[in-house]
Image (tube, rainbow, N blue to C red):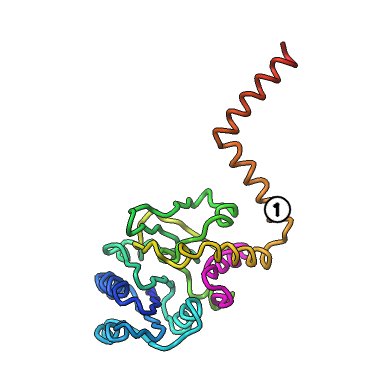
Amino acid sequence: MKISIITINLNNFHGLLKTIDSVLSQERSLYEWIIIDGGSTDGSRELIEQNQYNIDYWVSESDRGIYNAMNKGINVAKGEYLLFLNSGDYLKNDCLQSVVPMLRGEIMVGRVESESSGKLSYQYEDQSFSFSQLYYYSFPHQASFIKRELFIKYGMYDERYKIASDWSFFLKVLLREDINIHFISDVISVVEDNGISQTHKLLFEAERKIILGETIPSYLVEDLEYSLSLHELKKSRIAKKLYSILYRLFCHFFII
Protein backbone atom coordinates (compact mmCIF):
# COMPACT_ATOMS: atom_id res chain seq x y z
CA MET A 1 0.00 0.00 0.00
CA LYS A 2 2.22 2.80 -1.25
CA ILE A 3 1.73 6.49 -0.52
CA SER A 4 2.48 9.10 -3.17
CA ILE A 5 4.00 12.18 -1.53
CA ILE A 6 3.52 15.19 -3.80
CA THR A 7 5.70 18.23 -3.17
CA ILE A 8 5.29 21.47 -5.08
CA ASN A 9 7.92 24.20 -4.95
CA LEU A 10 8.71 27.59 -6.41
CA ASN A 11 11.88 29.44 -5.40
CA ASN A 12 11.84 28.10 -1.85
CA PHE A 13 15.30 26.54 -1.64
CA HIS A 14 15.61 26.50 2.16
CA GLY A 15 12.05 25.27 2.64
CA LEU A 16 12.58 22.51 0.08
CA LEU A 17 15.75 21.45 1.87
CA LYS A 18 13.75 20.87 5.08
CA THR A 19 11.14 18.90 3.18
CA ILE A 20 13.75 16.74 1.45
CA ASP A 21 15.52 15.91 4.72
CA SER A 22 12.26 14.83 6.36
CA VAL A 23 11.06 12.69 3.45
CA LEU A 24 14.41 10.92 3.10
CA SER A 25 14.30 10.04 6.79
CA GLN A 26 11.16 7.92 6.23
CA GLU A 27 11.14 4.21 5.40
CA ARG A 28 11.72 4.23 1.62
CA SER A 29 9.51 1.25 0.86
CA LEU A 30 6.42 3.06 2.15
CA TYR A 31 6.18 5.83 -0.43
CA GLU A 32 6.94 7.20 -3.84
CA TRP A 33 7.96 10.83 -4.08
CA ILE A 34 6.98 13.36 -6.70
CA ILE A 35 8.35 16.91 -6.86
CA ILE A 36 6.72 19.51 -9.11
CA ASP A 37 8.88 22.61 -9.33
CA GLY A 38 7.57 25.72 -11.03
CA GLY A 39 10.79 26.60 -12.84
CA SER A 40 12.71 27.91 -9.82
CA THR A 41 15.78 30.08 -10.28
CA ASP A 42 17.04 30.12 -6.68
CA GLY A 43 18.96 26.83 -6.73
CA SER A 44 15.94 24.62 -6.04
CA ARG A 45 16.30 22.82 -9.36
CA GLU A 46 19.94 22.02 -8.63
CA LEU A 47 18.93 20.75 -5.17
CA ILE A 48 16.36 18.46 -6.75
CA GLU A 49 18.94 17.18 -9.23
CA GLN A 50 21.33 16.38 -6.35
CA ASN A 51 18.61 14.19 -4.82
CA GLN A 52 17.05 12.84 -8.01
CA TYR A 53 17.97 9.23 -7.28
CA ASN A 54 15.69 9.37 -4.24
CA ILE A 55 12.85 10.98 -6.20
CA ASP A 56 10.50 8.87 -8.31
CA TYR A 57 9.40 11.70 -10.58
CA TRP A 58 10.29 15.37 -10.85
CA VAL A 59 9.88 18.23 -13.25
CA SER A 60 10.92 21.88 -13.24
CA GLU A 61 8.82 24.01 -15.54
CA SER A 62 6.44 26.95 -15.37
CA ASP A 63 2.90 26.27 -14.24
CA ARG A 64 -0.39 28.11 -13.74
CA GLY A 65 -0.37 28.16 -9.95
CA ILE A 66 -0.48 25.95 -6.87
CA TYR A 67 -3.36 23.72 -7.92
CA ASN A 68 -2.10 23.30 -11.46
CA ALA A 69 1.17 22.04 -9.95
CA MET A 70 -0.70 19.73 -7.55
CA ASN A 71 -2.77 18.35 -10.44
CA LYS A 72 0.44 17.62 -12.35
CA GLY A 73 1.52 15.53 -9.39
CA ILE A 74 -1.82 13.70 -9.25
CA ASN A 75 -1.54 12.85 -12.95
CA VAL A 76 1.73 10.94 -12.49
CA ALA A 77 1.07 9.45 -9.02
CA LYS A 78 0.79 5.68 -8.66
CA GLY A 79 0.17 5.33 -4.93
CA GLU A 80 -3.13 4.25 -3.42
CA TYR A 81 -3.15 7.32 -1.16
CA LEU A 82 -1.85 10.81 -1.91
CA LEU A 83 -0.24 13.17 0.62
CA PHE A 84 0.46 16.79 -0.39
CA LEU A 85 3.57 18.03 1.40
CA ASN A 86 4.62 21.38 -0.02
CA SER A 87 8.14 22.77 0.23
CA GLY A 88 8.79 24.25 3.67
CA ASP A 89 6.57 21.70 5.40
CA TYR A 90 8.16 18.54 6.73
CA LEU A 91 7.15 15.14 8.03
CA LYS A 92 7.29 14.46 11.74
CA ASN A 93 9.98 11.92 12.64
CA ASP A 94 9.14 8.48 11.18
CA CYS A 95 5.41 9.13 11.02
CA LEU A 96 4.78 7.07 7.89
CA GLN A 97 5.90 3.88 9.62
CA SER A 98 3.16 4.30 12.22
CA VAL A 99 0.51 5.69 9.88
CA VAL A 100 0.63 3.24 6.98
CA PRO A 101 -0.74 0.28 9.00
CA MET A 102 -3.69 2.49 10.04
CA LEU A 103 -4.65 3.69 6.56
CA ARG A 104 -8.29 2.96 5.82
CA GLY A 105 -11.28 4.44 4.07
CA GLU A 106 -11.20 7.00 1.29
CA ILE A 107 -9.72 9.79 3.41
CA MET A 108 -7.72 9.65 6.63
CA VAL A 109 -6.78 12.88 8.38
CA GLY A 110 -4.09 13.42 11.00
CA ARG A 111 -2.85 16.62 12.59
CA VAL A 112 -0.24 19.24 11.77
CA GLU A 113 1.96 21.23 14.12
CA SER A 114 2.84 24.90 13.72
CA GLU A 115 6.58 25.33 13.24
CA SER A 116 6.72 28.62 15.16
CA SER A 117 4.23 28.08 18.01
CA GLY A 118 3.97 24.30 18.28
CA LYS A 119 0.18 24.63 18.17
CA LEU A 120 -1.68 21.61 16.83
CA SER A 121 -4.42 21.71 14.24
CA TYR A 122 -8.07 21.08 15.06
CA GLN A 123 -8.78 17.54 16.24
CA TYR A 124 -11.72 15.96 14.47
CA GLU A 125 -13.40 12.91 15.98
CA ASP A 126 -14.70 9.95 13.97
CA GLN A 127 -18.04 9.78 15.74
CA SER A 128 -18.80 13.50 15.99
CA PHE A 129 -17.67 14.91 12.65
CA SER A 130 -20.37 17.14 11.19
CA PHE A 131 -20.97 19.39 8.22
CA SER A 132 -20.76 22.46 10.46
CA GLN A 133 -17.12 21.57 11.18
CA LEU A 134 -16.32 21.25 7.49
CA TYR A 135 -18.16 24.52 6.88
CA TYR A 136 -15.76 26.40 9.14
CA TYR A 137 -12.59 24.33 8.84
CA SER A 138 -10.72 22.45 6.17
CA PHE A 139 -8.53 19.42 6.58
CA PRO A 140 -4.79 20.17 6.53
CA HIS A 141 -3.57 18.75 3.24
CA GLN A 142 -0.14 18.11 4.82
CA ALA A 143 -1.81 15.52 7.07
CA SER A 144 -4.57 14.20 4.78
CA PHE A 145 -4.18 10.85 3.05
CA ILE A 146 -6.59 10.90 0.10
CA LYS A 147 -7.31 7.89 -2.08
CA ARG A 148 -6.13 8.62 -5.59
CA GLU A 149 -9.30 7.09 -7.03
CA LEU A 150 -11.33 10.00 -5.62
CA PHE A 151 -9.55 12.38 -7.98
CA ILE A 152 -10.15 9.99 -10.86
CA LYS A 153 -13.85 9.73 -10.04
CA TYR A 154 -14.68 13.32 -9.07
CA GLY A 155 -12.05 15.35 -10.84
CA MET A 156 -8.93 17.10 -9.66
CA TYR A 157 -8.42 20.44 -7.96
CA ASP A 158 -10.30 23.33 -9.51
CA GLU A 159 -7.60 25.58 -10.93
CA ARG A 160 -9.85 28.63 -10.94
CA TYR A 161 -9.06 29.09 -7.27
CA LYS A 162 -5.72 30.16 -5.86
CA ILE A 163 -5.96 28.99 -2.25
CA ALA A 164 -9.33 27.34 -1.50
CA SER A 165 -9.51 24.51 -4.02
CA ASP A 166 -8.57 21.78 -1.54
CA TRP A 167 -11.45 22.90 0.71
CA SER A 168 -13.70 22.89 -2.36
CA PHE A 169 -12.62 19.34 -3.19
CA PHE A 170 -13.34 18.04 0.31
CA LEU A 171 -16.69 19.82 0.36
CA LYS A 172 -17.72 18.43 -3.03
CA VAL A 173 -16.71 14.87 -2.25
CA LEU A 174 -18.02 14.64 1.31
CA LEU A 175 -21.39 16.24 0.55
CA ARG A 176 -22.27 14.19 -2.50
CA GLU A 177 -21.16 10.71 -1.58
CA ASP A 178 -21.03 8.42 1.44
CA ILE A 179 -17.27 8.74 1.83
CA ASN A 180 -15.54 6.72 4.52
CA ILE A 181 -13.41 9.25 6.41
CA HIS A 182 -11.32 8.62 9.52
CA PHE A 183 -9.36 10.84 11.89
CA ILE A 184 -6.26 10.08 13.89
CA SER A 185 -4.48 12.10 16.57
CA ASP A 186 -1.00 11.46 15.14
CA VAL A 187 0.97 14.54 14.11
CA ILE A 188 1.93 13.96 10.50
CA SER A 189 3.82 17.10 9.60
CA VAL A 190 5.15 20.43 10.79
CA VAL A 191 3.99 23.40 8.74
CA GLU A 192 5.22 26.92 8.16
CA ASP A 193 2.92 29.70 9.35
CA ASN A 194 3.45 31.90 6.31
CA GLY A 195 1.47 29.75 3.88
CA ILE A 196 -0.66 31.52 1.31
CA SER A 197 -3.94 30.66 3.09
CA GLN A 198 -2.60 32.37 6.22
CA THR A 199 -1.32 35.50 4.49
CA HIS A 200 -4.28 35.96 2.10
CA LYS A 201 -7.27 35.40 4.37
CA LEU A 202 -9.48 37.89 2.51
CA LEU A 203 -8.86 36.05 -0.76
CA PHE A 204 -9.65 32.75 0.93
CA GLU A 205 -12.96 34.11 2.26
CA ALA A 206 -13.84 35.47 -1.18
CA GLU A 207 -13.13 32.14 -2.85
CA ARG A 208 -14.95 30.29 -0.09
CA LYS A 209 -18.08 32.36 -0.72
CA ILE A 210 -17.99 31.53 -4.44
CA ILE A 211 -17.50 27.82 -3.70
CA LEU A 212 -20.43 27.74 -1.26
CA GLY A 213 -22.62 29.49 -3.84
CA GLU A 214 -21.77 26.85 -6.44
CA THR A 215 -22.08 23.87 -4.09
CA ILE A 216 -24.87 24.50 -1.57
CA PRO A 217 -28.26 26.22 -1.99
CA SER A 218 -28.18 29.68 -0.40
CA TYR A 219 -31.12 28.99 1.92
CA LEU A 220 -29.25 26.06 3.45
CA VAL A 221 -26.17 28.22 4.03
CA GLU A 222 -28.34 30.89 5.69
CA ASP A 223 -30.04 28.31 7.91
CA LEU A 224 -26.70 26.83 8.91
CA GLU A 225 -25.14 30.21 9.72
CA TYR A 226 -28.19 31.14 11.79
CA SER A 227 -28.18 27.90 13.78
CA LEU A 228 -24.42 28.09 14.32
CA SER A 229 -24.65 31.69 15.52
CA LEU A 230 -27.31 30.66 18.04
CA HIS A 231 -25.13 27.78 19.18
CA GLU A 232 -22.17 30.12 19.70
CA LEU A 233 -24.37 32.61 21.51
CA LYS A 234 -25.51 29.93 23.96
CA LYS A 235 -21.90 29.07 24.74
CA SER A 236 -20.77 32.65 25.33
CA ARG A 237 -20.41 34.24 28.76
CA ILE A 238 -22.50 37.20 27.70
CA ALA A 239 -25.33 34.91 26.70
CA LYS A 240 -25.16 33.10 30.03
CA LYS A 241 -25.26 36.39 31.92
CA LEU A 242 -28.12 37.65 29.75
CA TYR A 243 -30.00 34.42 30.31
CA SER A 244 -29.52 34.77 34.06
CA ILE A 245 -30.90 38.34 34.04
CA LEU A 246 -33.87 37.39 31.87
CA TYR A 247 -34.60 34.41 34.08
CA ARG A 248 -34.65 36.59 37.22
CA LEU A 249 -36.90 39.13 35.52
CA PHE A 250 -39.24 36.36 34.44
CA CYS A 251 -39.40 35.03 38.00
CA HIS A 252 -40.05 38.52 39.36
CA PHE A 253 -42.89 39.47 37.07
CA PHE A 254 -44.60 36.14 36.39
CA ILE A 255 -43.96 33.92 39.37
CA ILE A 256 -43.74 36.08 42.44
- Please identify the quadrant where the C terminus is shown: top right
For residue 91, which quarter of the picture? Answer: bottom left
Q: Is residue 163 magenta?
A: yes
Place of residue 104 in the rendered image (x, y in percent of width and height, measured from the top left): 44, 63
Q: Residue furthest top?
A: 256
User: Residue at left 38%, top 76%?
Assistant: 7
The spot of residue 16 in percent (x, y) is 31, 75
To which quarter of the image does residue 103 belong? bottom left
Left or right: 91 with respect to 252? left
Q: Nearer the viewer, residue 4 or 202?
A: 202
- Whole-percent x, y for residue 227 in the image: 66, 45
Q: Is residue 223 above or below residue 96?
A: above
Instruction: Answer whether residue 1 is visible to the viewer in this image.
Output: no
Magenta segment includes 42: no
Q: Is residue 99 left or right of residue 243?
A: left
Residue 175 or residue 48, whichever sits in front: 48
Residue 65 appearing in the image: yes
Percent coordinates x, y for residue 30 in the rendering: 32, 72
The residue where tag 1 is placed is 222
Q: Which residues are magenta?
A: 156-177
| Left or right of residue 44: residue 134 | right
The residue type indicated by label 1 comes to Glu
Circle 1 crowding by C-alpha within 10 Å: few under 14, some 14–19, many from 20? few
Mark 1, secondary structure of its residue: helix
In the displayed structure image, the side of residue 14 where residue 65 appears, left or right: right
Which residue is drawn at the image coordinates 47% and 69% (left, top)? 146
Quadrant where the image shows the N terminus:
bottom left
